[in-house]
Image (tube, rainbow, N blue to C red):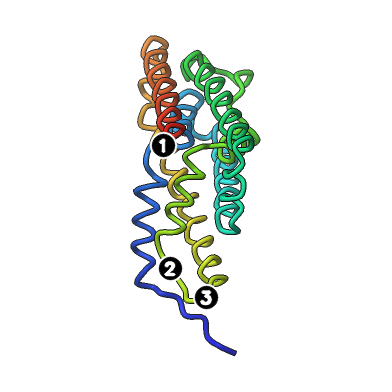
Amino acid sequence: MPQVAIRWGALAPLVLTSLAIMGSPGPATMSLVAVGSAYGVWRCVPYLVGIIIGSTLVLLAVATGMTATLLAVPAVSSVVFGIAVAYILWLAYHIATAPSLKQQDARVAAPSLASGALLGLANPKAWIAMSAVFASADLAATAATDAAAKILVLTVMIIVINAAWLGASATLAPLLRHPGKARVVNTLLAGALIIATALAVLE
C-alpha cells in the first residue's frame, strides 16, 4: 500500500495565506464583531457556529469544484449575492438599533445559528477567498489527498479565525454598557459591516 506523502513545507504558507485572505475584514468577520458587541459574546456563540458551518460548506463546494459551476451561472451568483446583501442590511439595522448591554434582557433575541449559516454560505467574500486560498498551495501529490488535507487545515482556520473575531468584540464591552456610547459604537460597526459587504461584492 503506497504511503501518503504530505508536503509539510507547504503547510505554513497555506496557513499564512488563509490568515491574510480569510482573516481580513469581510461581511462574516465584521458581523461577528458587530453582533458580539451588540448582544454579548456568549449569546452569539450559536451565530458563530452557524458562520463556521456556512463557511465550511463553501470550502467543500470549492474543494469539489462546485464553485466554478455555480458562479458560472449569472442567475445563481446574482441570487446568492442578493440574499447576502439583503440579510446583511437587515442585520446591520438590528445591530445599529440594538439596546446597550445594560438595557438588554432575555427577550432581546441575538442572531441565531441559522442566520449565521445563511451569512456564512451566502457571503460573497467567502467564495472568492476560499477559492484563492485553496488554489494557493499543494499539500500532497495526489488530488484526493491534497483536497482532504486542505479541507482539514482550512476548516481549523475557519474555526480559529471566526472565533478570534467574535472574541475581539469583548474588548468593546465596557463601552457598550453606556446607552449613548453603545448607540455610537453599534452604528459605526453596522456601517463597517455594510462597507465590508460592498467591497466584497465589488471585488
Instruction: Classify residue 77 by image quadrant.
Output: top right
State whether residue 6 is above or below residue 26.
below
Q: Residue furthest top?
A: 180
Dot in front, 1 or 3: 1
Looking at the image, which is closer to me, 170 or 122? 122
Q: Which of the numbered marks, if any, corresponds to residue 142?
A: 3
Residue at the spot x=55%, y=46% of the render?
Answer: 55
Q: Amino acid at mark 3?
A: Thr
Q: Secondary structure at mark 2?
A: loop
Looking at the image, which is closer to me, 160 or 16? 16
Instruction: From the viewer's perspective, tell me whether residue 25 is left or right of residue 28.
Output: left
Mark 2 or mark 1, which has the lower sequence index? Answer: 2
Please rate how many residues cluster around mark 1, counting C-alpha atoms within 10 Å: few if below 14, some from 14 to 19, many from 20.
few
Q: Amino acid at mark 1?
A: Glu
State whether residue 139 is above or below residue 15.
below
| Image marks 1 and 3: residues in contact by CB distance under 8 Å | no
C-alpha distance separating marks 2 and 3: 9 Å
| Image marks 2 and 3: residues in contact by CB distance under 8 Å | no
Q: Secondary structure at mark 3?
A: loop
Q: Which of the numbered marks, if any, corresponds to residue 8?
A: none
Residue at the spot x=54%, y=33% of the render?
Answer: 44
Instruction: From the viewer's perspective, tell me whether residue 190 is left or right of residue 50.
Output: left
